[in-house]
Image (cartoon, rainbow, N blue to C red):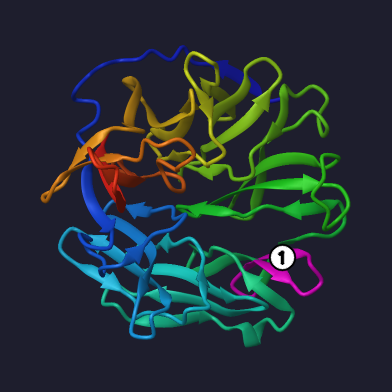
Amino acid sequence: MKHLILFAVLVFSLSSFASEPQLIVRADKHQPKGLPAWSKMPSMSPSCSNSGVAVKYLSLFGDEKLHPAVSFFQEKTISQTEPLESDISISELFITADQSIVFSQNFRGGTLGIFELSSDSRLKQKVKPSDFPNVDAMSRPSLLEGNILYRALNKDGLHTIYHGKKKILEESGDIAYLYLPTVKNNQITLKIGLGVPGEVSRKNKDKIVNIVDGKEVVVATDQDLDPTSEFLGFDNSPIPDGDGGVAFIAEHKIHGRSLWLYKNKLNKLIYASSPEKGRLEFFSPAVNPSGSLVFRVSKNKRISVLAWHKQGLKTLMKQGQTVLTNEESIRVMNRDQWPAFSGKPCISNSGEAYIHAVLEGETNLENKGSGIFKIRL
């Protein structure tokens, strides 16, 4: 069993801990920022680096259909794709070390492959479906040591993880299910279910693993795999910090639904859900190499985005919060049964958090689209 360390998390009200939210991108009918009018960012998680934030969005064009597109907003430049076909779905985005964007394009019943958007807005195909005739869909890609890494859905319904054209993991033998891998600084992290290949079941025995330089290190196991473990189960998307560490959400036999940080062969408790503090939502946390984490919590049917940092725990944004733009004062959606935030947050290595908030008028409750806000920790 992995050693566990419990953190006593204190709440500090230090104004220097986090800056005010700064609107970077906004999708809206009438007052967009950086995007065309009548654009939308539905169910979108921002991707970020030290130099900016990348988003995917939908926008109306001449045929009156919503077409997907990608934009990367850096301090002085914007790289973007032309509108793609309306029946295409775009995966989550990955920002490479040279600040290009890689993503997959799939459609119902097939895939167009994996593409790279360069910093000068050139779109280049990196993985062709003709090279993988047995593949039906390609997941969110990453770049590892110069080659594309992604999870493929095969025509037989099973998954394979490819690095370039090489298979590095597949659902066979005792591997029942491969969850989406995430890569940061050449560190691969994913959850693996052991059991009957192709089956996602409570009977599966789950583990979280790190793969660095081809070597697999087990981060944590559930009690089905290791009866001495204190973990009863895990959410599906553990996140690497790019320095050997892993942030993950688990169900713990003592602490319940809780957020953990694996570092230096130890699992540290960062946040335990409770009625007083709030319950961790089912969205992946974000983490950077310095150990700063950003995550979503729900309390009394209201959602907040929190950050854990060396200085303690801090609320970055919350439902109903007023935010300022150059044009008007608006607020984070505060209606029951409406989403206040969309997707999971992101944090850069240098400590900027990016949060996708759904917006409404402060007094008239008019829908005001959604925006990506940057907050400096």
The residue drawn where x is 48% and y is 24% is 299
Amino acid under disc 1 = Thr
The residue drawn where x is 64% and y is 39% is 235
Please check the rendered image and state whether residue 99 is part of the magenta-colored stretch, yes or no: no
The image quarter containing residue 163 is: bottom right
Is any atom of residue 107 visible in this view?
yes
Which percent across, then down, holds residue 169? 72, 60
Which residue is labeled 1 in the image?
160
What are the residue bounds of the magenta stretch? Answer: 152-165
Tell me if 319 is positioned left or right of 235 in this view.
Answer: left
Q: Is residue 105 above or below residue 74?
A: below
- Quadrant in which the N terminus is drawn: top right
Closer to the camera in the image, 65 or 349: 65
Name the element at disc 1: strand
- Quadrant in which the C terminus is drawn: top left
Closer to the camera in the image, 266 or 321: 321
Which percent across, then down, holds residue 172? 84, 60
Which percent across, then down, holds residue 89? 52, 71
Please check the rendered image and state whether residue 162 is part of the magenta-colored stretch, yes or no: yes
